[in-house]
Amino acid sequence: MKLVVTIPAFNEEKTIGKVIAEIPKKIKGIDKVEVIVIDDGSIDGTAKEAVDAGATVVRNGINCGLAYSFSRGLDTSLAAGADIIVNTDADFQYNQAQIPLLISPILAGDSEIVLGSRFGGPIEHMPFQKKVGNILVSFLMRVLTGLSLTDTQTGFRAFSREAALRLTVFSDYTYTQETILVAHEKKIPISEVQVEFRKREGKSRLISNIFVYAKKVGFTIIETYINYKPFKIFFSAGFMLLALGVLVGTRVLGHYLKTGGVSPYLPSAVLSALLLIFGFQVLVTGIIAELIKRGRKVQEEALYHLRKAHYAK
Ligand SMILES: Nc1nc2c(ncn2[C@@H]2O[C@H](COP(=O)(O)OP(=O)(O)OP(=O)(O)O)[C@@H](O)[C@H]2O)c(=O)[nH]1
Ligand SMILES: [Mg+2]
């Protein structure tokens, strides 16, 4: 069993060495541990510090984004023969001594993806806006997936090789919600363990403005959800518009049947026609999107087999 720990890092020279040093080198059930740092165009000494601490470093050259780097980390780990992949942050907020705990459900064969939830221990140091944001997004993700997860934004996660082979991430910026939605759609078992979460040393590299972050997270969730459940969304919206069109149109039709004219209800007639046309278009869009989704499912299955063969050990 080989464990690869991936660390996406952007200008983290102060903490990257400490994070690597903290990773346990001997873990029960694991024969080999390798650390891969994905240096995302850092302009400080991140890469050097990582190499000095004994990690393999892959460099993006320019800043490509956290989600892009996470994806590259998965691919590099698969190529390195990983059986289990742990992704962690470079800012020393997670306690790497908890990696054995994080991977234990995978080793036991109970889960394919394990999330390290930060909401089990003291998190008073998590800034208020982030705490509220994390709670709200986790709630939304619970509603969308039906899974009882408490922290869907955590950066401390473990993936089985099988899960990594099946995951695709489209966003460049954030992978945290997308991976859960994709895994849930592909029926990959996801579980959670409670982990420690330390105060950050220095400023966030990812979130300069909480509102910009919220907007990006919101769009990623909507895009991913539409991608995987198009019919559900378009059908609900189309059906609502059609129902509204029928409701508005009943009065007009009643008057027409009685008098043979619609003139006093002309605005309602126009509104009803618009709602019916628009609702119908949304329904048809849903059907087309559903057909595209079916095609994509086949493509993803083919991609999984291609990757499996490409990264065969
Ligand atoms: N590859 C890559 N990694 C990034 C980028 N921005 C942040 N990171 C890394 O992603 C991890 C999480 O970023 P943080 O800045 O700690 O974000 P956060 O944990 O959500 O926010 P804080 O609570 O303020 O720490 C760290 O390891 C960062 O170095 C980026 O543009 N590219
Ligand atoms: Mg952090």
Image (cartoon, rainbow, N blue to C red):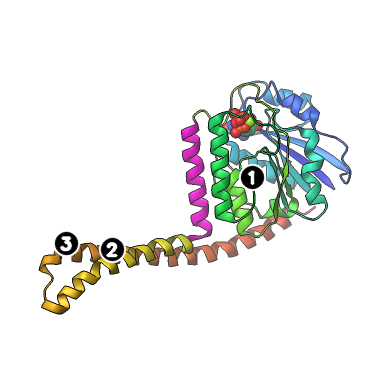
Q: Secondary structure at mark 1?
A: loop
The magenta region covers 210-230
Residue 211 falls inside the magenta stretch: yes
Comparing 257 with 52, the one in front is: 257
Please indicate, yes or no, whether residue 182 appears anywhere in the rendered image.
yes
Q: Residue at x 59, y 37 (%)?
A: 66
Q: Residue at x 69, y 50 (%)?
A: 164
Q: Residue at x 70, y 39 (%)?
A: 120
Comparing 250 with 12, the one in front is: 250
- The answer to which of marks 1 and 3 sits earlier in the sequence is 1
Q: What mark, if any, has residue 275 been given in the picture?
A: 2
Q: What mark, if any, has residue 150 been given in the picture?
A: 1
What residue did someone put label 3 on? Answer: 267
How far apart in space, not on screen, are marks 1 and 3 (Cα)?
49 Å
Q: Amino acid at mark 3?
A: Pro
Q: Amino acid at mark 1?
A: Thr
Q: Amino acid at mark 2?
A: Leu
When the figure is inspected, residue 227 is found, relative to residue 136, above or below; the finding is below
